[in-house]
Each structure stands twice: as C-alpha cells, then as structure tokens.
C-alpha cells in the first residue's frame, strides 16, 4: 500500500500522512507553506514563495528562511514533495483532500 497525504483546509487546518496527524512543524510558517502548496495545487518558484512568506525580510534572508523551512519540514512529508533549486511542489496526485 502506498503512502497517502491528506490536507484539510476547512475548519482547523491539518495534515495527515497515512491517517496520522503531522504535528511536528517547527514553525507556523512551515505549516502554512504546506497548506499553501496543497491549496494552490501547482509548482511554485522558490523566489515567489520566499517573497510571499517573508516579505518583511531582504530577498537574501527570505530565501535563506525558505531553504531552512524546507530543510526542517517533517521527514514524513518529504516523499510527497519535489524541491529543486528553482521550484517547490507538493505532489498533486498524492493529496487526497483539500
């Protein structure tokens, strides 16, 4: 049986992997990033994500913050993501509910 991810955005937002809640986000922005990727259901340029989530920081610091946030995402989420030097994607076929 393959792993599945469920992202709930109505009511209290939640991420579940194989029915188990993912609660170990290191920051609220990390959780918000996953919710945003699920809700938009497409690939996003890293630069755009950095600007969106850390607009109050310089470009360089915003990109550093994004890189750090992606690194510290819970390991159970990483198989569902494609992270490259230029873009970040939550696999749309893996998300069961938004």
Image: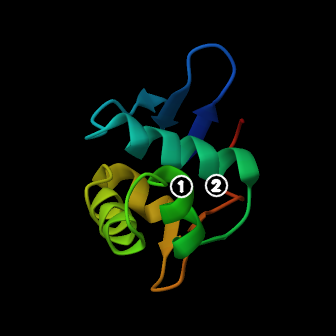
The residue at the point 38 percent across, 63 percent down is: 66
The residue at the point 58 percent across, 41 percent down is: 35
Categorize mark 2 by other alpha carbons within 10 Å: few (<14), some (14-19), many (20+): some
The residue at the point 27 percent across, 63 percent down is: 68
The colour mode here is rainbow
Residue 53 on image: x %, y %? 49, 51
Q: In the figure, 25 relative to 48: above or below?
A: above
Q: Identify the residue under disc 2.
A: 94
SS at mark 1? loop
Residue 95 on image: x %, y %? 66, 48
Q: In the figure, 50 relative to 14: above or below?
A: below
Compared across the picture, whether 65 is left or right of 32 comes to left
Q: Identify the residue under disc 1.
A: 2
The residue at the point 33 percent across, 30 percent down is: 23
* 47, 32: nearer the viewer: 47
Residue 26 on image: x %, y %? 25, 41
* 2, 68: nearer the viewer: 68
SS at mark 2? loop
Marks 2/1: CA distance? 10 Å
Q: How many marks?
A: 2
């Amino acid at each position: 049986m393959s792993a599945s991810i469920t992202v709930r955005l109505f009511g209290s937002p939640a991420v579940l992997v194989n029915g188990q809640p993912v609660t170990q986000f290191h920051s609220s922005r990390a959780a918000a990033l996953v919710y945003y990727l699920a809700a938009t259901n497409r690939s996003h340029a890293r630069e755009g994500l950095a600007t969106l989530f850390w607009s109050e920081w310089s470009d360089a610091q915003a990109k550093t913050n994004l890189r750090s946030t992606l690194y510290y995402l819970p390991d159970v989420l990483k198989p569902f993501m494609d992270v490259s030097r230029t873009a970040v994607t939550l696999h749309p076929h893996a998300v069961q509910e938004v």
